[in-house]
Amino acid sequence: MFGEFIKERRLNLGLTLRGFCREIGFDASNWSKTERGLLPPPRDEETLTKIAQVLGIKIGSPTWVELKDLAFVDAGRIPKDLLSDAK
């Protein structure tokens, strides 16, 4: 889910895998595995923020929340915003 989300946005912007990885400071080979769901996505705020900026996602927007939630879910964690929701 996370990998598909990122790959789709990356391709829509015309970013190559290598170009995207240069921007976010990741190895293209490992990032390819993340996009294919073979490696877990990053969950730290700093990396997710950098990814969002490269993809033109405004921090705090619904798309930003979706990016963060997908990263946590694909890593087998419950997103923090869902944990704090009483419902």
Image (cartoon, rainbow, N blue to C red):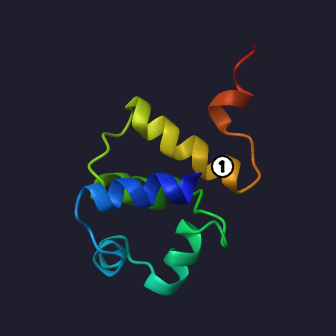
Q: Is residue 46 visible?
A: no
Which image quadrant for residue 13? bottom left
Q: Could you say where residue 18 lies in the image, as x and y percent from the top left?
A: 33, 81
33 on left or right of 23: right
Residue 42 in sight: yes
Q: Residue at x 37, y 31 (%)?
A: 61
Residue that appears at 51% across and 76% down: 32
The image position of residue 33, as x and y in percent, is 58, 76
Q: Say whether residue 83 is left or right of residue 43.
A: right
**Farthest residue, direction left:** 14
Residue at the disc numbered 1: 72
Label 1 SS: helix
In terms of depth relative to the viewer, which is nearer, 11 or 76? 11
Quick one: 48 or 16, which is closer to the camera?
Answer: 16
| Rendered location of residue 83, percent (x, y) | 73, 30
Q: Indicate the position of residue 54 as horizontal and vertical percent values.
A: 29, 59
* Crowding at mark 1 (Cα within 10 Å: few <14, some 14-19, many 20+): many
**Labels in figure, total:** 1
Please, what is the three-letter code of the amino acid marked with disc 1?
Phe
Q: Quadrant of the C terminus?
A: top right
Q: Is residue 51 above or below residue 65?
A: below
Q: Residue at x 49, y 45 (%)?
A: 67
Give the residue drawn at x 33%, y 60%. Answer: 10
From the viewer's perspective, tell me whether residue 8 is left or right of residue 54.
Answer: right
Question: In the picture shown, does residue 61 fall above or below 30?
Answer: above
